[in-house]
Image (spheres, rainbow, N blue to C red):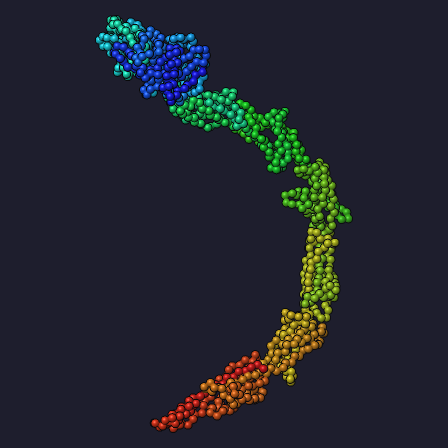
Amino acid sequence: MKLRNKIPLKGKFLYSALVVLFAVLTIPAIKLFTGANAATNGDYFLQASTWRTLTLAQSIGGNASYTAPVIFNDVQPLYCLNHDLEEPHSTYYDKNTAVKAAYSDPRMIGALYYGFGGKDQSLQQKHNISNDEAQWATQMAVWIHAKALGIENNTTKSIDVNDMNFDNASVGNYLKELLTKTQNVSATSATQNTSSVSLTNEQHFRENGYEVITYDITIGTGTNSNDWTFNKTAGGSDVIIEKTADNKLKIKKPIGLADTVTGTVSRDPSTIVQNTHKVGSLVLLSRDSSKQNLIQLDDETTSTTTTVPPTSFRATFVASNKDLTVEITKTDNESNRVQGVVFEVATDNAFTQNKKEITTTANGTAQAVYTVAESLNSFTLYIREKSAPAHLIKSNEVKQVTFTGNERSKQVSFVNELKTGRVEITKVDENNSPVSGVVFEIADNNNFTNSQRLTTGVNGIVNSSAIKFPANQSQVTMYVREVSAPSHLIVSNEVKTVTLNDNNRLGRVTFVNNIKKVDIRITKTLVGGGDVSGVVFEVSTNRNFPAGEVWTLQPTNNNGQTIGHNIPLKNGEISKTLWVREKSVPNHMVLNNTPKSITIQAGQTGELRFENEPKAYQSIKIIKKDETGKLVPGVVFEIADNKDFNNSIEDTTKPNGSTVLTTGILSSPNDSLSKTYYIREKSVPSHLVLSDEVKTITVKAEENATLRNVKFVTVEFINKLKRYNVELSKSDLSNSAPIEGVTLTIYKAEDKNNTNKIFEQVTDKTGKLKGLSLLPGKYKFYETHATIGYKINPNAHYFEVKNDGKVIGETNMTDERQDYDFIINKVDDKGNKVAGVVFSAKNKLTGKEVQATTDKDGIAHFHGIWGEYEIREVSAPEGLIKDEKTYTLNLNKDGSYEKIKVVNKTIPSEQPALPKTGEGKNGQSGILISMAVAFSSLLGLTVAFMVKKH
């Protein structure tokens, strides 16, 4: 059957008319009325003025057609089941008294209780459908139950909802679940009997967290009509039974829990007048508007006085619940599903409330189902792992899952890490040094199938990849063996095991390998034959013998031999190249510091031979120089090993100014390593002064000194050269007179830049230098300061002192006289230049006097003078008084002098006659002349002397 849920919102009237016409022509229908009025108190009339029908369902098989008329109105819809009735044909429809107790069937009651307009609306909320859709589906449920009961006309078969297809899946799911729930609803009244106590009008509703079933208790007439009691004979501990104020039996059960409650209702007194009930037709509406939507019997009663036995009751609760399912998926960290993980699920994070334990199945999932009230909008669960298989690490995570709205299932996943371990292999040699490049094999079986190969790194360590614990096992045993090793090592054939478990995730194992080795034998002899004992050798693999890589062997024995045992090979070596050198030898032997090398195959002994020479004392090298640093040949020396020079030997310096004396070799280990000698001069060439110094020299026998490579101890003697007196003089060029006070400086003739001064002195009164003593050689001298009155001589004068003391060359230097000019400047006391003044300058040394007269510029010029002068004024022009004072002019070496100031007085003039009063211009002229004469008497004379170098 294809069932279409179509509820048009527009054009309802036209559409309704068509449906009514169709319904009249087809089959009797189930009617839904939206309003009802009681025409009289005795009869029920249903007003159908607003009645109309819509076709909501049709069959698609055969010619039969079923309709479910439905009326929409603004009031809450009411349901009515009509039996054997024609279609309404007038405004009022008079109900037919039916004998079939359709509404006594619990399925019909359930449809009205859980369907639209009933007491429990959770299904509609669950499936999220509209009121129109729920209204339609509820009527369909009533219709389907009616056909199943056989109370619908023309019923040929029951309708199976599973044969229906729905355009709106939510409506279909709602209808199916409504039909399922109504199969389990039972609220059967007590069997009608002669008891005057009866239970009627079973009601289902929810109240303050409880699902409630109530019964009206009909107790008939008689005394103490309200006096009754009840007892619960079966039911859960959470069930509450009580009597209401309006004499109802009220049974309360927490929402979401199913149970069946039985018990008895007793009447006191037991003898009452009771009504006998006869069931008539069923109607939906009670006369009491508060009982709207409740089913009520329209009974015919008779009164009878009887003894009332206890009346039993039975109320069955079917949980109006929803099942909330949480599915847990468990995988390991490689995405494999895991079986056997136990989870705890509870409604609190302390895991004390409503706790369940569930275990994952082979597909790695587990489900926990919690049944809760359908109306519950939020429900939270907490999940944690309680235990896991031994090969997994148990998760400590707590996850929270919250159901809201219409959610019925949740999925949550937990991931466990596989327990893994590693094996760390350490490889060292017998010296505990790490070894790289060693290949190991590791497996979980001693046959080493499916093994992995590992190679040690530079630190001698290698770690395996992650090793998984076998399924459901808390440990694993691994086998390790060495496959190959570097060529310098002996491969180990040992197999080692290491067990990994929860307490030991990193198993460590160490392999130690022996090193392949070589030996070396060394023989020590003297040059020319003979074994040498007591010689110590060093051995290294590096010719530079670095620290830390050197082995010291035992000293050679009396046969001159020593052996080095068990010298290890290094990584990659199949043979060993060794370097050998002497470390120490006896005192009389020369250490051979030249290393030798030898290559020895592993496990073999190499042979080396060393020869040594006897040790020699240092030789003495005598160097002879004069005081100028010149090497001197021909000097004879005496050398002896005693201060008295007994048994001395002599030797003479060669043309290179030196001589060498060899002092011999050591003959045995007992010889002293040093000797002392004494040296002195015996004769020297004639130009030298013989030294009386005696020098002491100690020579040593050094480690590597032989007669072929002996070293020298150098001793140097320096002799003074013989010096000769040299006379240098200074004289006047004009008369050869000696000149005192001249500074002469002497240099070597080859000193071109005059950087090394030999001698410097001032000439005495005789014009000579005193104390000049020079070595033989060539010299030059200069005048560096001249005497006053002489010009400096700029020329160099050369001379030579021969080895015999004879002096040749220029030894006398002459100077020219130095003349100076100076002037006298004459002015009067008015500053006027004065001509015609005669001055005299007299040389105090020679007495020579010269004169000069001032010219028109007031200047008197003196030429060609030098030394110290007396200056005086010889004559003055008329009108000036001659200065009688004598002045001294001190002429310095550089021609400068102190200035001389001369003041002259003027000659007084006669007083002129004073002019008479009133003489006019002539009188004024006389006055002016008199004033001029008076002023001239105040004149003075100032003379300035200036000297200019000629």
Which image quadrant for residue 126? top left
Percent position of residue 389, x then y: 51, 23
Residue found farthest to the left:
223
Q: Is residue 65 left or right of residue 74?
A: right
Residue 316 sits above or below residue 453 on the image: above
Residue in front for this viewpoint, 336 or 526: 336
Q: Observer-nearest residue: 66 or 503? A: 66
Q: Residue at x 70, y 38 (%)?
A: 575
Which residue: 68% across, 70% down?
A: 750
Vertical comparison of 211 with 696: above or below: above
Residue 704 rendering spot, x and y as whole percentages:
70, 51
- Decide if residue 397 is on the left or right side of residue 804: left
Residue located 46% across and 92% down the image:
879
**Residue 629 appears left or right of 142:** right
Q: Quadrant of the N terminus?
A: top left
- Say which quadrant the C terminus sits in: bottom right
Is any atom of residue 233 visible in this view? no
Q: Relative to 711, is 230 above or below?
A: above
**Which sits in the foreground, 300 or 690?**
300
User: Residue 880 location, x and y as percent?
Assistant: 47, 91
**Dividing the picture into quarters, in which one does residue 477 lie?**
top right
Q: Where is residue 510 in the image (x, y as percent from the top left)?
A: 60, 32
- Between residues 125 and 820, which one lies in front from this camera angle? 125
